[in-house]
């Protein structure tokens, strides 16, 4: 039986013209691919040069310069922000350090009733509204950018133990969105796009219920400057982050060759945002930070010890639970029972301005001035006109 024409043609070798056509197609695809890669490299380099950050980190870059820099590694950003001398540091490098800010002595103007307030920008803005509404008040503010309650407690504790002159009223502001930082040892890992270098202890509870704080090796801007120039100290700090900071990720922290590529930085930025959101959501769980079972008892212990020591020092403790956009009453749900059980005065902002109403917030995430005023008035009600500072013992409150 003769073979069919189809089987005969399939066994025949391809013609030279056909082989040449395939090779030419492959060469064309390769050429297009190489030109595409070359074009991307040229664009990458050109954009990087056109929108590179100012040589002086103290100068504020443009919106586009900052946009194309957001994806640089945290280490890469630090090496840009931290100068050779303190005078060359970017402003953010100077903010929030416990050793620097918590030992400053500042007196109150004569005739003013003073209060100390610990926290972050929300706390400071509430204090500003309080002193505006009542000119007889004056505040001393201790805090850091988006500072968590462990930073505030550590600052108060250092002032208390150093026997600093505490104001008659001691106020701690706790921001719901900063509670996640109770699982960190500094402001770097939860602020990937704009790192905040200041550090603070991460607290835990021992078996007998006592607070224990782990403080990282870097405690000041100068410590950070030294570590960046000493590979052994830098590796030790990074290992500390890997062991004690829930949000640490080597892929977004360590500097590498991709810091020099705009495209690679944009990819890293997307990855960093996703990683931060995933870990934050995991901590929050279904509500009330249920994904982090250690947070409620540690936060409760911090607030109770703050109040205990404030009272021992002859001052009046107050806590402000600041529930910002998207957090509902998750902070109140874990803190209010402890505050009530220990007779600690508090204000929960969710009962005054809704955290779910976008009209209560401005673009940067803070409350509107009107909302801050409402909160300040609620705190002032705790002061009350039936309580005055006893002139013979300026650090104590007594009824009129």
Image: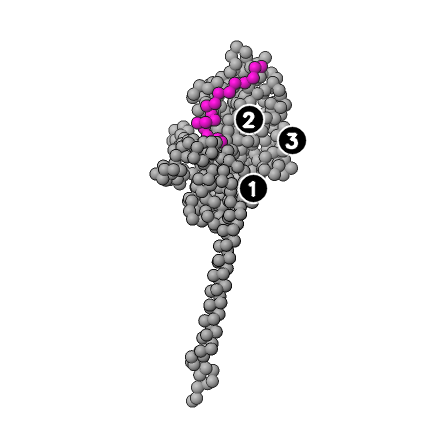
Residue farthest toward the top in the current orientation of the protein: 392
Give whichever of discs 3 and 1 has the lower sequence position: 1
State how far apart marks 3 and 1 are (Cα).
30 Å
**Residue occupying the point 57% across, 39% down:** 326
Q: Which residue is mark 3?
A: 370
Q: CA distance from mark 3 to mark 2?
A: 20 Å
Q: Residue 318, image x and y in percent?
A: 53, 24
The mark nearer the N terminus, 3 or 2, is: 2
Write the residue at 51% across / 26% down.
142
Q: Determine whether the residue tagged by mark 3 lies in a helix, strand or loop.
A: helix
Where's the N terminus, which quadrant? bottom left
Q: Which of the numbered marks, if any, corresponds to residue 339?
A: none
- First to last magenta residue range: 95-111
Q: Quadrant of residue 361?
A: top right
Q: Residue at x 53, y 23 (%)?
A: 140
Between marks 2 and 1, how big is the CA–CA gap?
A: 41 Å
- Counting from the top left corner in percent of width and height, residue 175 is at 53, 33
- The residue labelled by disc 2 is 346
Observer-nearest residue: 199 or 55? 55
> In the rendered image of this protein, does residue 85 appear above or below residue 267?
above
Task: Identify the element where label 1 is drawn.
Answer: loop
Which of labels 3 and 2 is toward the front? 3
Label 2 secondary element = strand
Within-10-Å neighbours for mark 2: few <14, some 14–19, many 20+: many
């Amino acid at each position: 039986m003769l073979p069919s024409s189809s089987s005969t043609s399939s066994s025949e070798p391809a013609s030279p013209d056909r082989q040449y056509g395939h090779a030419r197609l492959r060469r064309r695809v390769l050429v297009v691919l190489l030109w595409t890669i070359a074009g991307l490299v040229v664009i990458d380099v050109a954009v990087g040069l056109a929108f590179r950050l100012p040589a002086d980190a103290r100068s504020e870059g443009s919106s586009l310069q900052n946009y194309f820099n957001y994806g640089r590694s945290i280490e890469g950003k630090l090496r840009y922000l931290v100068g050779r001398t303190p005078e060359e540091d970017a402003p953010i490098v100077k903010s929030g350090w416990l050793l620097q800010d918590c030992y400053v002595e500042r007196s109150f103007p004569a005739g003013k009733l003073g209060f100390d307030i610990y926290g972050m920008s929300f706390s400071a803005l509430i204090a500003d509204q309080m002193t505006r509404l009542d000119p007889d008040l004056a505040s001393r503010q201790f805090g850091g950018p988006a500072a968590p309650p462990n930073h505030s407690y550590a600052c108060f504790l250092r002032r208390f133990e150093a026997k600093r002159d505490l104001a008659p009223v001691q106020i701690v502001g706790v921001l719901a969105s900063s509670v996640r930082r109770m699982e960190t040892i500094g402001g770097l890992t939860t602020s990937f796009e704009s790192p905040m270098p200041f550090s603070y202890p991460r607290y835990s509870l021992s078996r007998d219920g006592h607070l224990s704080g782990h403080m990282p090796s870097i405690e000041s801007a100068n410590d950070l400057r030294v570590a960046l120039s000493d590979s052994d100290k830098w590796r030790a700090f990074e290992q500390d982050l890997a062991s004690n900071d829930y949000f640490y990720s080597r892929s977004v922290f360590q500097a590498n060759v991709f810091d020099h590529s705009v495209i690679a930085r944009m990819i890293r930025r997307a990855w960093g945002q996703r990683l931060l959101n995933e870990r934050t959501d995991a901590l929050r769980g279904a509500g009330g930070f249920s994904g982090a079972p250690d947070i409620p008892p540690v936060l409760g212990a911090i607030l109770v010890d703050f109040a205990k020591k404030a009272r021992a020092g002859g001052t009046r403790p107050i806590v402000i639970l600041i529930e910002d956009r998207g957090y509902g009453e998750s902070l109140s749900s874990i803190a209010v029972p402890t505050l009530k059980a220990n007779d600690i005065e508090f204000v929960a902002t969710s009962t005054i301005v809704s955290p779910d109403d976008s009209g209560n917030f401005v673009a940067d995430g803070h409350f509107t001035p009107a909302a801050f005023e409402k909160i300040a008035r609620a705190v002032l009600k705790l002061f009350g006109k039936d309580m005055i500072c006893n002139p013979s013992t300026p650090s104590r409150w007594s009824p009129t």
